[in-house]
Image: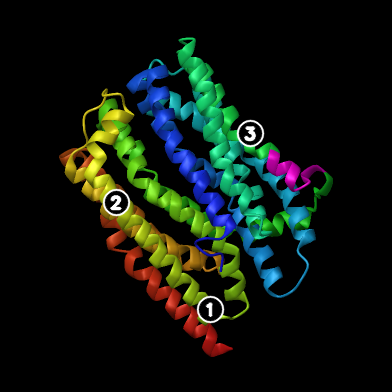
Amino acid sequence: MISLFSKEVIAGWLARLIVILLSFVNTKLIIECIGTDGFAGYSILASLTGWLSICNLGIPTTIQNQIAKLKGTGLDYTNVRNASYGTFICVTLLTFPIATITSVFSSNYLLINYSLISPTAVLIIIFGIFLAAQSQIFTQILHAENKSIWPNIYPALTSSLLSLILSIFVIYNIKDYTLFACALTFCTLAPIAHALKKLKFFDSIKFEKEFILNQIKSSKDIIKFSILSTITLSIDYIIMSRILSPGEISTYNLTSRLFGLALILQSVLLASNWSHLSILLYAKKFDEAKALLNKLLLQGLAIGVIMGVINLTFSDKIISIWSSGKLEKPDFLLCLAWFFYILIRIYTDTYAMALLCFNKTNIINEYIPRQALISAISQLILGHIFGPTGIIIGIILSFIFTATWILPISFKKITRNTYEKN
């Protein structure tokens, strides 16, 4: 197990601490540069990250699992890794038109009431999100090769660059949204250059038609999972763009960022232990795998409770300072709902990770359509009645009726049945 105090996790948490601290600074700078309405528009575009991540066709996760499986059985994985680079190029070119269509849809539907955001700015931001999603394959391979320290510190690099550029914008009173979009995209893509160099991408790339086709075929369950989970978790801003004001959207966004910090810290644990847990499962070491999973659960929930209590206590003051007093304080029920939601997510994300790294995506895909339907309907109804609080309650209900009990039961059943067969 990569422990709570391993160098990979410590580096990841230090990087996330930098991200957390700079997120306060960057949010203030963004609002200073483009205003609260501009920030609300940016929040809507950023929410499309999950949708655009579908364009990588699940290849990053598939490659990481394949490498872990080969390592778990003592086989060489070099050819799979090198051939996956060719898959990356082909999939990026194949799905690029989707990013263009998303940009047009965003400008003419989601942001129809945000005249300050030009179609050019939207295209630049969408382009950056799209390429970042495609490039997840490099961070996944770094994790699979036990080089987690690099992908764990990339977010800190991105945030630091953005702080520097936004500070220059504020000093020189630059309030152009297109320039903001260029800065944001540059900072998002900068770490990718280092990953390419670290992996010797251009020296190792291979194009194998049969491998590419087989890779896409092998990813079909993960693609389905990505689509359905995105519908469940990323439809909130699409709904809010039609029923809530820019101020309400901005308040919701800052509240989600504040409470979501616990998920950011937990993600370091999960990402750093993904390959290790996968190797244990493929090696049929189920007792060790379960012990690792239980430790990750306890550590994640401890993070969620501690940070949640702090956020509940000081959320009013934090968000007031964060937005320079330009946004209303969040309702206590909204904060309480987010606290509860984060604990649910920590619990379900840990079990979901265990199933995904064992290539049991089909289990999640069986229930997630029901969860997506419950989530969408609940958000529409409760959002109209209770505003931002209704949105997050709708998402919570979708988890309570599905993932919270299906995932742990499925994992225990799969490991027990697999053990009995062997």
Residue 295 percent across, percent down from the top left: 44, 70
Q: Is residue 356 visible?
A: yes
Q: Secondary structure at mark 3?
A: helix
Q: Quadrant of the C terminus?
A: bottom right
Taking the image as shown, residue 259 lies to the left or right of residue 271, namely left
Distance, label 3 to label 1, CA atoms, is 38 Å
- At x 47%, y 17%, the residue is 177
The residue where tag 3 is placed is: 190
- Which is nearer the N-term, disc 3 or disc 2? 3
Report the predominant secondary structure element of the magenta stretch: helix
Q: Pick whichever, 25 or 225, lies toward us.
A: 25
Tell me which label, 3 or 1, sits earlier in the chain.
Answer: 3
Front residue (pair 360, 311): 311
* Amino acid type at image mark 2: Gly
The magenta span reads: 194-202
Residue 309 in the image: above or below residue 175:
below
Separation of residues labelled 3 and 2 (CA atoms): 32 Å
In this figure, which colouring scheme has been used for the structure? rainbow
Q: Amino acid at mark 3?
A: Ala
Q: Which label lies toward us, 3 or 2?
A: 2
Q: What kind of element bears circle 1?
A: helix
Report which residue position mark 1 lands on.
288
State which quadrant residue 77 falls in. bottom right
Q: Given the current orientation, which residue lies at the most extreme top position?
A: 172
Q: Residue at x 61, y 75 (%)?
A: 282
Q: Nearer the viewer, residue 105 or 308?
A: 308
- Give the answer, above or below, for where 378 lies relative to 157: below
* In-image side of 394 versus 20 (left or right): left
